[in-house]
Image (cartoon, rainbow, N blue to C red):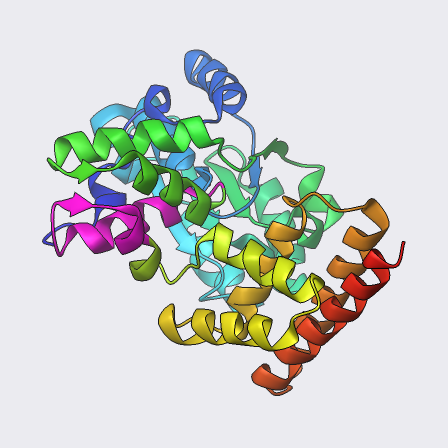
Amino acid sequence: MKEIWLEKYRPKSLDEVEGQEEIVERLKAYVKSGNLPHLLFAGPPGTGKTTCAVALARELFGDAWRSHFFELNSSDERGIDVVRNKIKEYARMAPMEGGFNIIFLDECDHLTGDAQAALRRTMEMYTRTSRFVLSCNYSSRIIEPIQSRTAVFRFRPLKPEAIQRFLERIAKEEKLKVTPGAVKALIYVAGGDMRKAVNSLQEPASVAPDIDEETLYKTASTARPEEVKKLIETSLGGDFLRARDALDNLLIEYGLAGEDILRQLHRSAFEMSLPDDFRVRLVDAIGEAEFRLVEGSNERIQLESLLAKFVVFGQELKGR
């Protein structure tokens, strides 16, 4: 594929942003007034934070938006020096055509505490020439003095219908035949993340224009939800060996890592019909296994240990 669809189909205006209607309306009010305070965009990945920042700059400054917009990813340069040098140097520059410049700091929750303290002072000193738009996944990692100086916008995971509309638009433009099952699979894989949905669509589309459910799950390295539910049901039913075979299928056929399987088990645990107290125990066991994997434990042993716990839970459930 010659183009990355994320850039090719990135909304050019606030009206084109999907799934964040309340936020878009607030941002349009700033565009109408021709002014804005410092902003903080917080929310999960792939929900439109960067898109809204760029669209806001486009609508405020028109074709000259690039000369008023400075973007920096804080996960790459996260120390105090980048604030004292790069950011401060740009913030003090007078805008070329009057008004103000926008400094967009992506993933600013990766900035160190000292860097955030220096940033707070920079935001205060250069308000006349610059407005800061800070983007983060976890607003709790942003120091309180910065949060109190910004208007906070909380982005939520995108709803299935918003993701479906955007994907159908891309499929129409790219002349793809995407089955209804594949659209449903894309929404499941995305989990509210538009970026993940678009990338998951582009990968199989680079091979063939006809995309079905089976192809999509394999290229996205995601197990079918029904197979994950079957794994839980089999283990709760007391058949450990069959559950182990189903686990092997997920690891080998789909090429999933242990943490990928745990994430899908966690998601499926809330979609199954189970007594609440057993659901609590399942989630607790999944969380324990995930912690052990992150700490470096053997993947196979921890996953099979988790299935063994499910078998024990299932026996207790039968004894009720």
Q: Is residue 250 left or right of residue 319?
A: left
**For this rendering, which residue is in front, 287 or 81?**
287
Q: Is residue 152 left or right of residue 228?
A: right
Residue 177, by quadrant, is top left
Residue 181 in picture, x, y percent from top left: 33, 39
Q: Which residues are magenta?
A: 192-216
**For this rendering, which residue is in front, 314 or 144?**
314
Main SS, magenta residues: helix
Is residue 88 visible in the rendered image? The answer is no
Q: Quadrant of the N terminus?
A: bottom left
Q: Residue sitting at 44 percent across and 72 percent down? A: 249
Is 157 situated above or below 139?
Answer: above
Is 87 situated above or below 156?
Answer: below
Residue 146, magenta (yes or no) = no
Is 30 situated above or below 47?
Answer: above
Q: Residue sitting at 42 percent across and 26 percent down? A: 161
Residue 117 in picture, x, y percent from top left: 67, 56
Is 163 situated above or below 278?
Answer: above
Residue 18 in picture, x, y percent from top left: 40, 27
Q: Residue sitting at 32 percent across and 61 percent down? A: 218
Residue 287 in picture, x, y percent from top left: 72, 65
